[in-house]
Image: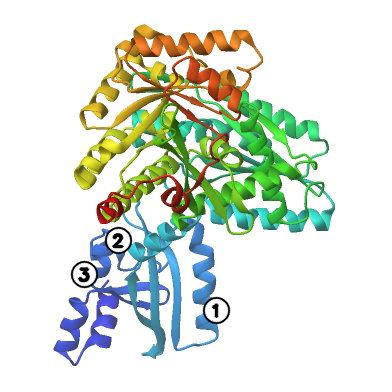
Amino acid sequence: MSESKRFSDGILEGDEKFRALVEHSVVGIYIIVDGKFIYINKRLSDMFGYERSQLIGKNNLYLAHEDEKDAVSKIIEKNLKEERENIEYSFKGVTKSGEIRYIHVFGSSFLYEGKRAVIGTLIDETERVLAKRELERLARYDTLTGLYNRYVFMEEFHRAIELAKYRKHRVALFLMDIDNFKRINDSLGHGEGDEVLKEVSRRIRRVIESEGGLFARIGGDEFAIIIENFDTIDEIGTIARKLKAVMKKTIKIDDYQLRITLSIGISLFPEHGSDIKHLQKAADIALYQTKKEGKNDFAFYAHDNGALIEKIALENDLYKAIERDEFELYLQPQISTKSSLAKGMEALVRWRHPQRGILFPGEFLELASETGLLYRLDIVVLEKVLKLLSRWEKRGYRLPIVSINISNALFHHSYFLKMMKRNRKIYGDLCKYVELELTESIIMQSTKDSASLVKELAMLGYSISIDDFGTGYSSLSHLKSLNVNKLKIDRTFVHDIATHKNGQVIVKAIIAMGKTLGLEIVAEGVETEEELKILQGFGCDCIQGFYYTKPVTSREIEEKWLVCEKREENLL
């Protein structure tokens, strides 16, 4: 110890300020002679949790982790052997309490009294190293489930395909999502939805790890699996069946027992494509097919899915169409059977597709329902109608009642009543010219809640009509409890009224029952004069159909069907 002190004092002697700087430095400073510490400052001893006396005389590898002692020793020996003046390296150290520290070393080698000595600094980079590792982890892993993320999935999928091309083996891609996951989020909350995602991930991971595959979460409730180098398609089918089986046990979230199912689409390399783009598209199509056929299953891509590819392309366009305002309002007048004047009109929608031209509702409404966009489309139509009524009022037109079809998705949406109240504040009495068309099935889904909601809408000034009456399962007792203004007889009853007595009996009965309740009756789908006369004879108030006009633009309505009160005043 005295010899070590003599050496260290000799090296540091001559400048008390220099000695004080070394003692109070924010980095660890050491002097090594013959491979042993002869001096360390307070910062270095604190860094590793030792007293200085416990380290003086110890080998300079004393602070290195067992796994790294050999590597560090070789670095030091190499530097000394080559008689380098400057030494720099990093090592993993261990504190007295066993904590891991990441250290960077800078040293200078020199001769002192004929002996090789090294003086240097130890910088604790633990926080930086751990922060870097955390950033790398976040860049590669999903923070909620701990699974690989989309970035790693794409990277690994590319590697798997390139390797398969070289080795001539096959690769399977699974794309899957949780059936009706949005409903879980909307009803229980996003926190509970996250718990479902974590539990589903744990179950799938157990299956995939045993199969040697790669499992990633690529977004929301969407997952991807890569299986490499298998022999038969049946092996892939077996894995898919295991994924279904592992979900049979319910998932307990709070006080709820949830039955969770998966829909899975599978594509194969090289059968379904030779690159990532085509294989992903094929798996997407297979997943879409699974959902279309009832969910809770898996499907392999089939080459004859051309129509499905077109439907998926249309689905992608539909998302953009709402944002781009590609939907146009069309209207079909409801004509009085007594005066032949338009008493009201139904608002309909057309999609002006940038490539396909005008698309009719039958070409996109079902798709909008499947994708969860139908309620947004209803909102678009409602806003367009209110703006149109506002424009007509300013131009002096006598305002008609405009009816709007309200889907189940919007009627039972938590946002619906708030939106209708907001519209009432913005547009005022114009809302009295808006008639909300509801189907029997919507009203009957939750009779008590529906009646309450209809009552609130009526109090706000909106009119209510029952659309497609006679096709559902409502009764007059239910209609009596609702604030309904109008019944619309479904076109299926009107279509054969001229040739089928049974159809006439049904229509006559509906009209009579509606009149008993004081409701206005509208028959839709009227195409011939004979149908018109029969309905007039039964006391039907209005007809709607091609007999008078097909749905037309608002400009055509203004030109042919609206009365301009300002114009009448000028004539007087």
In the figure, is residue 492 to the left or right of 416?
right
Based on the displayed image, in which of its 4 quarters is residue 376 positioned?
top left
Residue 78 circle label: 1
How far apart in space, not on screen, are marks 1 and 2 (Cα)?
Answer: 26 Å
Dot 3 surroundings within 10 Å: few (below 14), some, or many (20 or more)? some
Say above or below: 514 vs 402.
Answer: above
In the image, what residue occupies the spot 72% across and 53% down? 278
Nearer to the camera, 279 or 80: 279
User: Mark 2 is on which residue type?
Assistant: Phe
Nearer to the camera, 215 or 291: 291
Nearer to the camera, 363 or 300: 363
Tell me the SS state at disc 2.
Answer: helix
How far apart in space, not on screen, are marks 3 and 1 (Cα)?
Answer: 29 Å
Q: Earlier in the sequence, mark 1 or mark 2?
A: 2
Q: Residue 236: horizontal and vertical position, in percent?
A: 74, 34
Q: Earlier in the sequence, mark 3 or mark 1?
A: 3
Q: Which residue is mark 2?
A: 48
Q: Which residue is mark 3?
A: 42
Tell me the SS state at disc 1.
Answer: helix
| Residue sitting at the far bottom | 14
User: Mark 1 is on which residue type?
Assistant: Lys
| Residue sitting at the far front | 572
